[in-house]
Amino acid sequence: ISQLMIFNNEMMKMDKRYREPCETFVKLLQPFAPHIAEEMWSILGQVGSLTNVAWPEADASKAVENTVEVVFQVNGKLRAKANVAKDMDKAALEALAMANERVQEFTNGKTVVKVIAVPGKLVNIVVK
């Protein structure tokens, strides 16, 4: 129900209303609020009961996340975050962390002792 409310709030922000998302919303609402859903279904211009309509098919490709948020730390303290490709390797992740403006503020003029990179999670730069 919470996700339906979030979806509804996002739809209300849109300039235009599209029929397909509205119909899908009503289909998903039907098990929780059948009477309201039936009323909304008829307002959308549909004929017949919503009970006989097929449930929406899920598209698994849309559920796959290609990016992940990685944190950049200097001496164990969070200094920056970045969204990167999920399969980014350690070397590219380290290079991205070292190029980050916020990280450079804390590493300039200091010696980098060690760089710990955990793909998909974090990069910790140890400096002296």
Image: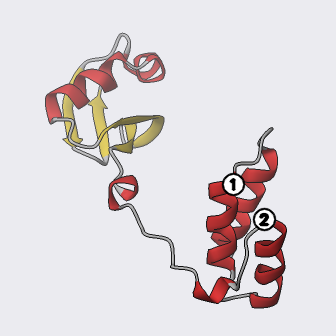
> CB under 8 Å between callouts 1 and 2?
yes
Name the image quarter holding the C terminus.
top left
Placement of 41 over or under 9, stated as above or below: below
For the residue pair 80 and 54, the one nearer the viewer reads as 54
Outermost residue to the front? 47
Residue 34, given in percent of the width and then of the height, sits at: 74, 89
Residue 45, given in percent of the width and then of the height, sits at: 78, 66
Residue 88, given in percent of the width and then of the height, sits at: 21, 36
Picture quarter containing residue 31? Answer: bottom right
Name the image quarter holding the N terminus.
bottom right
Name which residue lies at 73% across and 67% down: 5
In this view of the protein, can residue 115 be seen by the observer?
A: yes
**108 relative position to 23: left or right:** left
Residue 21, given in percent of the width and then of the height, sits at: 64, 57
Identify the residue position indicated by label 1 in the image: 19
Disc 2 residue type (three-letter): Leu
Residue 44 marker: 2
